[in-house]
Amino acid sequence: MRPENIRNVGLFGHGGSGKTSLAEALLFNAGEINRIGSVDAGNTVMDHEPEEIERQSSLGLGVASFDHNGTRVNLIDTPGYADFVGEALAALRAVDLAVFVVSAVDGVEVQTEILWEAARLEGIPRVVFVNKLDRDRASFSRTLDELVEAFGKRIAPIQIPIGEEQSLSGVVRLVSGRAYRYESGRTEGAATDVPPEVAEAFEETRSALVESVVETDDDLLEAYFEGEEPSADRMVEVIHDGMLAGDIFPVLVGSAGSLVGIDTLAEFVVDFGPDPLERTMPATLTGELAPDADGPAVAYTFKTSGDQYVGRVNTFRVFSGSFKPDTVLENRGGDKLKMSSLFSLQGKEHTGLPEATVGSIGSVAKLDRLRVGDTLRAPGCVTEIAPVRVPRPVHEVTVSPRSTQDEDKLSTALARIQEEDPTIMVERRAETSETVLSGLGEAHVSVTLAKVARLFGVEVDTGVPRIPYRETIQGRADAEGKHKKQSGGRGQFGVAYVRFEPNQRGEGYEFVDQIKGGSIPRSLIPAVDKGIREALERGILAGYPVIDVRATVYDGKYHSVDSDELSFRMAGIMAVRAAASDLRATILEPIAVVTIRVPEDYMGDVIGDINAKRGRVLGMDADGRSRVLKVEVPMAEVQRYSVDLRSMTGGRGSFDIEFARYEPAPPQEVQRVVAAAKAAAE
């Protein structure tokens, strides 16, 4: 397939806008499937994972293809919920055109705005498909107003609907001036003249489209002022170029449910959409990248998944050269990888692929050293494509196998899951002896653990991670640390006099040696330091490490025979214990900076909730139709913030969280933490 005859199209938008149903309708229209599945019934091509069927929602990107008038359209359906945004961001790297599906009932929602900006940064042309126009409360005019408000005056309708809600019967193409009526169950509209009931709307909207088109070209604008409109072919050309430049965002209309406007969408993708040679190349870390069919083979791996029959499947987009089965390639680490098979995906089905050239989307099995974000390239090629940037995980749970016999299996499972999903993080926290799994939200973590149980047979118990509190001191004290032990033979003896005082916040632990006159031999002073560190690490109040302490050893005693490193290490430990009651220890709690993005209507609720969580607002900005709030709040208060924010905003809010510093906890919080530590110890 020549690159000029390939279209790589992604369906993006907020959850529930009908992306998967639209993909199903496009495949049905092209004859790839003989019946239309439904998300509710769990029998669509794109949503085939058991977790997707159970939740009736896309949780990962799906790939399928169809032919239209001699052009191969590779279609990628993406999740629309914030918990799975990593999959949508990965899909943006693979496509040349982003179709944003917007519900005519719900309008422009937050996730649509977030992904719109991500598409802009990736340099991907954008088009809008207003879906669900046959539903109750659907309104094209209201949705169009929201699109213009969110994305500016470059929004340009090239179609308008005939009727709305139950009366939706067709679409009018503004460029050709033709109307298309759809009979029930048929995907092809019957061409007709513009009906009288939409004639006025047609004239107004077409005039606005023509003005948008001529404004992008000085010659066309001059001719327009002289009364000459551009021809239909010239309109197509200018709209195409305007999409590539980000100057025009065409709007199409229809309904996936009633198959209205599906054929015209397919035609638009082929006639107006960019081909792979016109795509803005992604940034590279090393080497250069150009869409050259005769250049070195270079592809980007944007999806890794497990298949029960063939094992790991990696899906990639070719940016240069071509790939064939049985060739040897390299990943970014220089590992040699033999591509034993090459195939394309149709949902979960595999079809053999003899070659993948520039613009092709292909898949390969059993390359275990190939990861999401890797560049797959010809040996000797130095080009490495920069990985897609994904948000940091914000929702944490502890994980442990229900059976101790499954510990090794769980470790293997979590490592595999991390390789497949860059938005999942697994870490072992030594200070709490917990294994912590982090994801983008509660649903993300829940789905991940369901996959672990299904694919690896490991049932997992979860919990809330312990907050990494710290302790510090507020008082000064001089203490004698004395260790003396005699049990026959050589004994143990060491005495260290140590002064403890607060250090500057953030300076950590500081050890000062003021020994004079050899009261402690120089070789044994480091042992005192080691003992003090060890004791402070165990905590004074609640078992958390003590920080921001200056310990000055200024005197001591030793025995020429019985003193050794162990003796003075124990002396350091005993000095901390002796001083503890006078140091006025307190708890430091971790403070997080949280960046929250929500629609303006929810700002009052969100700010009120942050105040209730002992937080404070640092600043507020507008971003499109959303508001971005920056706050500081104790980390203990936002451990389940993904759940809280979703509840407050109906899933329309998102946030990012980052550790900032430690601050003294208020007295009531200190009491709570100490009481909890004592209860846990008992």
Image (cartoon, rainbow, N blue to C red):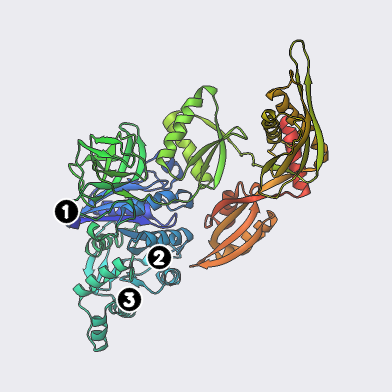
Q: Looking at the picture, which amino acid does disc 3 mark?
A: Val
Q: Could you say which quadrant of the image residue 113 lies in?
A: bottom left
Q: Secondary structure at mark 1?
A: loop
**Residue 131 appears anywhere in the view:** no
Separation of disc 2 and disc 3 at Cα? 15 Å
Q: Which secondary structure, mark 2?
A: helix
Estimate the x, y position of residue 647 in percent, counting from the top left: 58, 53
Q: CA distance from mark 1 to mark 3?
A: 41 Å
* Apparent side of residue 418 relative to residue 318 in the rendered image (left or right): right
The residue beneath circle 2 is 165
Residue holding disc 3: 198
Horizontal placement of 437 versus 260: left or right?
right
The one of 418 and 130 positioned closer to us in this rendering? 418
Instruction: Give the residue pinned by disc 1.
Output: 2
CB under 8 Å between discs 1 and 3: no
Residue drawn at the location 40% of the way across and 46% of the way down: 60
| Residue in view at x 68 percent, y 53 percent | 613
Percent x, y of residue 519: 77, 30
The front one of 607 and 134 is: 607
